[in-house]
Amino acid sequence: MTYFDNNATTPLDARVREAMRPYLDERFGNASSLHRAGRLARNAVDAARAQVAALVGATPEQVVFTSGGTEADNLALAGTTATLPLGRVLVSAVEHSAVLGPARRLAGQGWEVVELPVDGACRLDLGSLDAELARGAVRLVSVMLANNETGVLQEIAEVAARVHRCGALLHVDAVQAAGKVAVDLGALGCDLLSLSAHKLHGPQGAGALVVDRALALAPLIVGGGQERGLRGGTEPLAALVGFGAAAELAAAELEARGAALGALRERLERALATIAGCVLVAADAPRLPNTVQFALPGFDGTALVMALDRKGFAVATGSACHSGRRSHVLIAMGLPEAQAQGAVRVSLGCQNRAAEVDAFAVALSQIAAARAGASAG
């Protein structure tokens, strides 16, 4: 099986696995314990926190570990609004469900929640943002850095300047961007930033919310006071060590990874251009170097995913959290029904090679030719 669904999850880097191994075996202490085993565990968690902070230009004190990107997004929205007077929350219409879900829950708790439109290339409509900010009482805005389906990058620094002029806070879901493009907390200008280990060749089950030090935040999970009281529960030691190792590798190899993934993406897009009727989604927008979304005429996306699966390729129709459903992202972009229903996402990873891309293009051409032949018959 050739794995081309790296925006859903990535394979664990062998070097990350090796960094985790001692903490799965002999160094298994609880980081809250006072004895030597506990102190060694605490040192490992602290080191991982520093590694994750360095990836995004933050300080270790700003990193709150979570179970993943979904919990980080939930903590950002629910934890922030719990400390603020009722008002308005703005989110882009193409956010991951980990943001849209808690935002819609806030709407049932007395908050006015507005979903901001995007254009046909998945870019946030800044004019609509300005208009909503001008209406006043905006407490929090959430805009993702990179879309998980299209790979499109948003102009976060522009968004941050507008949001802060109105006295609101900005949360950025950087789960898909971190490890693929440079992510710097200061340059982005946001107040909260979500991350996830398993999107950058780290382990599943570890994530982080990076929080401005002056920001008040209410915990979602209370208990033993871990994570400065912001996230109760025993730290998953091995997973956090793996997160730290993956973050350090991603930072060190960012330029090389980006160049390699970008070259593979260009190779794939050249091949797709030779398939009759193939349409690339948001092809002219700034995107992640690893993500291609396309549609073939006459194909249902789910059926095409399964046809490719039978030929040995793992791809997706969009977010793994909404597999098999029509994409809310493509609906928000205003794509024609046939494209929205038939779109497939290829997301490349560090383990992928040019020969795999070429083989995929051949398989896809065969599937398209077989459909065309059947239609003609």
Image (cartoon, rainbow, N blue to C red):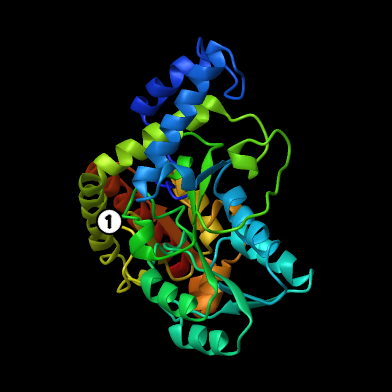
Q: Is residue 293 above or below residue 89?
A: above
Q: Label 1: state its secondary structure.
A: helix
Q: Is residue 3 left or right of residue 239?
A: left
Q: Amino acid at mark 1?
A: Arg
Residue that lies at the very extreme toward the right in this rendered image: 109
Residue that lies at the very extreme toward the front in this rendered image: 214
Q: Quadrant of the N terminus?
A: top left
Q: Is residue 87 left or right of residue 357?
A: right
Residue drawn at point x = 46 percent, y = 52 percent: 175
Q: Is residue 128 above or below residue 341?
A: below
In this orientation, which residue lies closer to the viewer: 188 or 60? 60
For label 1, count other residues whose C-alpha is less than 10 Å away and answer few (under 14), some (14-19) or many (20+). many
Q: Give coordinates of residue 89: x percent, y percent.
A: 63, 74
Q: Quadrant of the C terminus?
A: bottom left
Residue drawn at point x = 60 percent, y = 17 percent: 34
Q: Give coordinates of residue 67: x percent, y percent.
A: 59, 40
Q: Give coordinates of residue 100: x percent, y percent.
A: 63, 65
Number of marks in the rendered image: 1
Q: Give coordinates of residue 219: x percent, y percent.
A: 68, 49
Residue drawn at point x = 70 percent, y = 33 percent: 224
Q: In this figure, which residue is indicated by the disc labeled 1?
A: 265
